[in-house]
Image: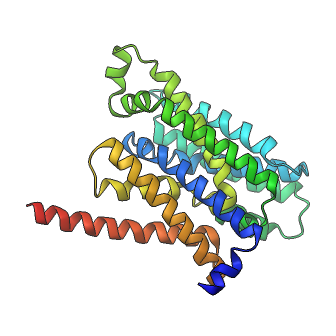
Amino acid sequence: METLALYLQYPFVRYALIVGVLIALCSSLLGVTLVLKRFSFIGDGLSHVAFGGVAIASVMNLTNEMLIVLPVTVLSAILLLKTGQNAKIRGDAAIAMISVGALAFGYLIMNIWGTSSNLSGDVCSTLFGSTSILTLTTGEVLLCVILSVVVVVIFVLFYNKIFAVTFDENFSRAAGVSTDAYNLLIAVVIAVIIVLAMNLVGSLLISALVIFPALSAMRLFKSFKQVTIFSAALSVVCAFLGILISILAGTPVGSTIVAVDVLAFGLCAAAGSISGRAKA
């Protein structure tokens, strides 16, 4: 505890905790919707697109990668949504096609036109996360806070519509709900979350932040609201513990957070199994 108190005196540690908790919260809110719509891997696909955006930004020597990464990822989310509705290219095939293509082109761009002397290190840190979460500036933290607040507000304001589109899209359309517009809203918000999460866990591990808290909550609760609330709380706790463990043990931030999420899923699955047997 003394060591932890010592670390918490440093602003960069507090910044990392704030950003990590906010990203985990945002990821978990829409994670339940994506899991129920069987679109879990959209996070994986968009994260690979974001990697391609990072590659373009690094080649252009942009100091603020967000100027390239965010628009590219949002446009890809819209394209992915439209392509996934095509009868000839279903959702999972569209995700695989876009994600693999973006990942390949991103690495190719960095390899051919990159100016870094440590290409392998840059690629590894982008894919699996790095210590950049511990070097956040005040401006980056403020941007993350603003975008996170926007995501949470959108989710709260449109909760009922998101709920309706998640469970029965055809009925919602028949009832007059603009399902295409809300699906587009979900895709854009997920794209924003993916871009925010890249500094935390890297592009290959982002799906874990989206999927594991939702799956863990589903092992214990049945209603959409209960699952969403528990998923958000669990995601925040896992991110907080993961960052603290990473700082104290010197382990990679992203991998540590995902490991904590996996352990939490195992505990929830065991608790759900025991509870089910007790009721039986």
Q: Position of residue 220 (x, y in %)?
A: 28, 57
Q: Is residue 102 visible?
A: no
Q: Position of residue 189 (x, y in %)?
A: 59, 38
Quarter of the view holding residue 3: bottom right
Q: Position of residue 123 (x, y in %)?
A: 74, 64
Point 81% across, 51% down: residue? 139
Q: Is residue 122 visible?
A: yes
Point 37% across, 42% down: residue? 36
Q: Position of residue 14 (x, y in %)?
A: 69, 66
Residue 167 lies, with reference to residue 274, above or below; the image says above
Q: Quadrant of the C terminus?
A: bottom left
Q: Nearer the viewer, residue 262 or 220?
A: 220
Point 70% across, 59% down: residue? 199
Instruction: Determine the residue located farthest toward the bottom in the rendered image.
Output: 2
Q: Quadrant of the N terminus?
A: bottom right
Q: Nearer the viewer, residue 237 or 82?
A: 237
Quarter of the view holding residue 170: top left
Q: Nearer the viewer, residue 242 or 95?
A: 242
